[in-house]
Image (cartoon, grey):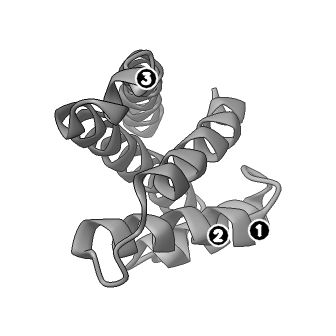
Amino acid sequence: MKNTQKDDAGLEKLKKAIEALEHSLTYEEKVKKDNFYFSGISKSYEVCLEYAWKYFKRRGTEEGVEIYSPKEAIKIAGRMGLIDNVEKWIDFLEDRNLAVHDYLGVSNEDYLETIHNFLIEVKKLV
């Protein structure tokens, strides 16, 4: 029963993160005038992605699979049928890593496109 409660709590956190991401995207037009809004949107995305992979990890662990990284969690989620397109989810993770560490200077437009695509996919979980 503890696992179910933990899973429910994880799913609730994910739902709230999705709601926060949707809300943050209502400020998307302001990004053009003030980068502050972009920072808020991107942080909402990062938090939501974090809760999603941790949800995958928790589900995999319940099935007896040891998971040590977000990428592994995504692959397991695909094997478990939680997500349809593993490569798309890995791309979300890689785009997030590129943007956070700013290796290649991901443009705001490209990152927002990633965020919108992610939102479509993550909403399928709830």
Give how far across and how far down residue 38 sits, in percent: 29, 39
User: Would you say 107 lies left or right of 122 here?
Assistant: left
What residue do we see at 48% from left, 68% from top? 95
Residue shown at the point (27%, 75%) measured from the top left: 102
Do the CB atoms of the residues marked 1 and 2 lie less than 8 Å apart?
yes
Residue 126 visible in the shown view: yes
Helix, strand or loop at mark 1:
helix
Query: Could you classify mark 1 by the number of other residues whose Cα lies within 10 Å: few (under 14), some (14-19), or many (20 or more)?
Result: few
Looking at this view, is 43 or 71 the one in front? Answer: 43
* Residue at figure coordinates x 34%, y 49% from the top left: 46
Whichever of callouts 3 and 2 sits on the residue coming sooner in the sequence is 3
Q: Which residue is mark 3?
A: 29
Relative placement, left or right, of 73 versus 26 is: right
Question: Which of the labelled discs sits on residue 15, or is there none?
Answer: none
Amino acid under disc 1:
Arg
Type of amino acid at the residue the image marks with label 3: Glu
Judge by depth and name the residue closer to the eye, 83 or 18.
Answer: 18
Which dot, 3 or 1, sits closer to the camera? Answer: 3
Residue 61 location, x and y as percent? 48, 62
Residue 6 left/right relative to 66 = left
- The mark found on residue 76 in the picture is 2
Task: Determine which residue is flagged by label 1.
Answer: 79
Q: Please tell me which residue lies in front, 103 or 84.
A: 103
Q: Is residue 102 depicted above or below 115 in this figure? A: below
Image: 15 above or below 81: above
SS of the residue under disc 3: helix
